[in-house]
């Protein structure tokens, strides 16, 4: 069967492959310490689940507006105004089937053949593939541990060409856990505005910050606000990964175009799930603090254990729930390290090559402290 050429350009997900192998071992009764998964190990808060149940009982099971339930879009606008200082209204917001579809839709709208989209590396592994599926070219800018994996304005300036359409920013970052400061964003914003680019700001981990605070580049105001598309969702902050609710906020012209695209692809997001999302934004927020505090303790534990293993090192994560661990002194690349670690010691890690850096692996601390202690002891034995 002949397939469309665009799908041949897309690489298979290495993290999903590792996760599938991990789950296969677990299904066979093997005790696996899983540090691959990128989702909170908490249950969705009860009041959110109850709101979805009530919506089901109330018959909220029919088609809804392609842009999302009006009440949810209003609630998102209120959240962005309250938490991020962003003056968006309902018409500036579209609800999508998870943050991943929100990013995909955005790139389909703004990029095409002949365009370039700048992506700092290490990056979330789906960014380059989404750009390729839009027919555009991903331009990768490598960052290093010396800069704490942050893009400098000089690097950005040097990568821009007449074909550059946009830049993708992710803060807090998956996989590095770094967080851009307001001052660092201001420097990048000057370059972006100078060259009249768009910035796609992936802020899905904004509620999981342990050092400093989260700043949305759109909150800098003025010209950068007009050139920013904010992508966010409910998966990480409210432990709602399976609910598949994300959103975009940005200029009305772009949001209208995304809504039109979505009307011909997925129609609308699951209606009753959106009422759970409304409850998430309008209900008790204490869950956010409890989860963040738990992750902060796990971060300190895993960071200390990793840096206590000879030949391994990593920066302390500032946000999200990942450590990006340097394995270069082991003499192995990231796939060799990850596969052998899983095969021989039953510890699952995400190979850094999936994120554009073959000298690192990603450990997720979205798991229990007991699992972290046991898993890091196995990693120590493996490295020794």
Image: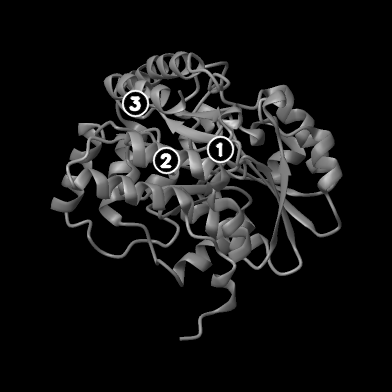
Q: Are marks 1 and 2 in contact (CB under 8 Å)?
A: yes
Residue corresponding to mark 2: 340
Q: Residue at x 66, y 30 (%)?
A: 149
Q: Quadrant of residue 121?
A: top right
Q: Quadrant of the N terminus?
A: bottom left
Residue corresponding to mark 1: 332
**Image coordinates for residue 363, horizontal then vertical, percent:** 45, 31
Q: Residue at x 17, y 42 (%)?
A: 29
Q: Is residue 126 above or below residue 217?
A: below
Tell me which label, 2 or 3, sits earlier in the chain.
2
Q: Quadrant of the C terminus?
A: top left
**Callout 2 environment at 10 Å: few (<14), some (14 to 19), or many (20+)?**
some
Q: Residue furthest left?
A: 57
Q: CA distance from mark 1 to mark 3?
A: 19 Å
Q: CA distance from mark 2 to mark 3?
A: 14 Å
Please tell me the numbered disc located at residue 346.
Answer: none
**Image coordinates for residue 15, horizontal then vertical, percent:** 44, 48
**Callout 3 environment at 10 Å: few (<14), some (14 to 19), or many (20+)?**
many
Please tell me the numbered disc located at residue 375.
Answer: 3
Does 104 sit left or right of 289 as displayed?
A: right
């Amino acid at each position: 069967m002949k397939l469309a050429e665009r799908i041949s350009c897309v690489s298979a997900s290495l993290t999903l492959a590792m996760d599938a192998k991990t789950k296969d071992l677990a299904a066979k009764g093997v005790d696996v310490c899983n540090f691959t998964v990128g989702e909170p190990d908490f249950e969705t808060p009860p009041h959110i689940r109850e709101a979805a149940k009530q919506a089901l009982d109330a018959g909220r099971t029919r088609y809804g507006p392609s842009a999302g339930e009006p009440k949810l879009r209003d609630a998102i606008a209120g959240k962005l105004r309250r938490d991020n200082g962003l003056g968006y209204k309902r018409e500036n917001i579209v609800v999508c089937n998870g943050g991943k579809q929100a990013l995909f839709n955005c790139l389909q709208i703004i990029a095409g053949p002949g365009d370039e989209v700048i992506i700092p590396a290490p990056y979330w592994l789906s960014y380059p593939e989404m750009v390729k599926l839009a027919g555009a070219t991903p331009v990768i800018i490598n960052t290093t541990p010396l800069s704490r994996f942050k893009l400098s304005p000089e690097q950005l300036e040097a990568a821009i060409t007449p074909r550059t359409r946009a830049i993708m920013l992710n803060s807090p970052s998956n996989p590095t856990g770094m967080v851009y400061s307001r001052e660092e964003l201001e420097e990048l914003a000057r370059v972006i505005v100078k060259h009249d680019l768009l910035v796609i700001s992936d802020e899905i981990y904004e509620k999981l910050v342990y050092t400093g605070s989260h700043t949305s580049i759109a909150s800098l105001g003025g010209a950068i606000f007009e050139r920013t598309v904010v992508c966010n969702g409910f998966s990480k902050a409210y432990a709602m990964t399976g609910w598949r609710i994300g959103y975009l906020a940005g200029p009305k012209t772009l949001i209208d175009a995304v809504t039109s695209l979505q009307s011909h692809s997925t129609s609308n997001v699951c209606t009753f799930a959106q009422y759970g999302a409304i409850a998430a934004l309008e209900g008790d927020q204490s869950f956010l603090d409890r989860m963040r505090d738990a992750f902060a303790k796990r971060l300190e534990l895993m960071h200390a254990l990793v840096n206590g293993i000879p030949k391994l090192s990593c920066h302390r994560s500032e946000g999200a729930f990942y450590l990006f661990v340097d394995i270069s002194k082991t003499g192995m690349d990231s796939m060799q390290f990850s596969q052998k670690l899983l095969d021989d010691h039953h510890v699952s890690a995400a190979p850094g090559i999936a994120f554009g850096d073959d000298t690192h692996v990603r450990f997720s601390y979205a798991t229990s402290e007991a699992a972290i202690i046991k898993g890091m002891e196995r990693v120590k034995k493996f490295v020794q």
